[in-house]
């Protein structure tokens, strides 16, 4: 595992400059998840480049919360890991209980897992060609949360998140960013995987940018049984959130409407009455 962090430096520096530079002067640590287990004991919190299998996602979040500054979580899980799904060539992380809430500035980057690639299709081409390799898979409980932030800013890239009541909860003021993720679907972005009862894709209480104008930033936010994006940021922060360039209510092919119960919308991309959007938001 030695040397993995060096290969991440340029990517992390770009994310740092675009999101955190105005508020901070230095980056902190990178914790590299190297197994799909859910252990929280100290054995799986070491996150040492020199020791294989010593860093779970739970352990990495615990370490990042205890570290001052802007930390990063990257992934380098081997195919020998029990969570490797050979049929789809990806890795599934299935927390036994809610992961610790993020309490300080953090970048979680699924595109660091070898084999993962961001979308390259233009808006005119439609759809998403992203190849995701890390799946955060809930147990279907009607009270579970996949990833939550209650302090600092969070950047999430290149993760598939599904089968939680709330797949992604952005509760601190932000500004947060969600880029190139599949939220509410399987790893292919073509099958709905909702939790039992009502489920939410993203719940916003802090300001966030969801997606963007570049192809690599496009999210697929579909398959959630109640609301794709529940945006409360306009009532809890001075600035509303921006939701742009995403596929909401559609599969990654940009055409298939994923068959789940939705409260309103037509399944189109980023329209005012888009599928699963709780309220209008500011556009760029």
Image (tube, rainbow, N blue to C red):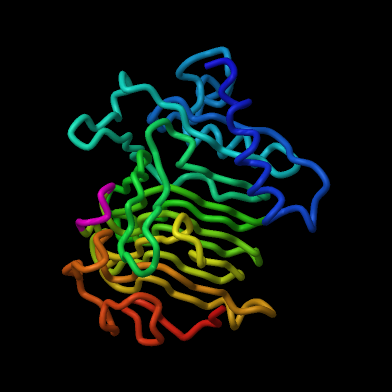
Query: Which of the pair 280/236 is nearer the observer?
Result: 280
Residue at the image position 34 percent from the left and 44 percent from the top: 131
In the image, residue 265 above or below residue 82? below
How many circles with numbers are drawn on the protein? 0
Q: Is residue 188 magenta?
A: yes
Position in image of residue 261 (x %, y %): 21, 74
Magenta-highlighted residues: 187-191
List the single residue furthest toward the top: 50
Q: Is most of the magenta stretch helix, strand or loop?
A: loop
Q: Is residue 260 magenta?
A: no
Q: Quadrant of the C terminus?
A: bottom right
Q: In which quarter of the image is residue 60?
A: top right
Position in image of residue 256 (x %, y %): 19, 67
Residue at the image position 41 percent from the left and 26 percent from the top: 77
Position in image of residue 103 (x %, y %): 64, 50
Name the side, left or right, on which 64 lies relative to 224.
Answer: right
In the image, residue 269 above or below residue 19? below
Residue at the image position 35 percent from the left and 86 percent from the top: 273
């Amino acid at each position: 595992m030695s040397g993995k962090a060096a290969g991440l430096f340029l990517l992390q520096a770009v994310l740092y400059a675009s999101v955190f530079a105005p508020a901070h002067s230095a980056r902190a640590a990178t914790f590299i998840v190297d197994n799909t287990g859910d252990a929280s004991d100290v054995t799986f919190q070491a996150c040492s480049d020199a020791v294989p299998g010593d860093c779970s996602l739970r352990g990495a979040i615990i370490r990042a919360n205890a570290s001052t500054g802007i930390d990063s979580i990257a992934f380098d899980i081997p195919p020998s890991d029990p969570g490797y799904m050979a049929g789809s060539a990806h890795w599934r992380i299935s927390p036994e209980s809610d992961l610790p809430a993020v309490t300080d500035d953090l970048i979680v980057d699924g595109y660091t897992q070898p084999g993962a690639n961001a979308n390259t299709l233009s808006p005119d081409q439609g759809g998403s060609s992203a190849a995701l390799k890390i799946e955060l898979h809930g147990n279907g409980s009607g009270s579970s949360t996949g990833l939550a932030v209650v302090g600092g800013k969070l950047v999430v890239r290149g993760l598939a998140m599904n089968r939680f009541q709330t797949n992604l909860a952005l509760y601190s003021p932000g500004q947060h960013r969600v880029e190139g993720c599949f939220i509410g679907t399987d790893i292919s972005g073509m099958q709905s995987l909702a939790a039992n009862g009502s489920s939410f894709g993203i719940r916003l209480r802090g300001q966030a940018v969801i997606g963007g104008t570049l192809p690599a930033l496009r999210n697929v936010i579909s398959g959630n049984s109640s609301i794709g994006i529940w945006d409360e940021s306009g009532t809890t922060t001075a600035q509303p959130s921006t939701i742009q360039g995403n596929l909401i209510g559609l599969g990654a092919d940009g055409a298939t409407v994923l068959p789940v119960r939705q409260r309103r919308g037509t399944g189109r991309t980023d329209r005012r009455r888009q599928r699963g959007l709780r309220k209008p938001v500011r556009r760029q």
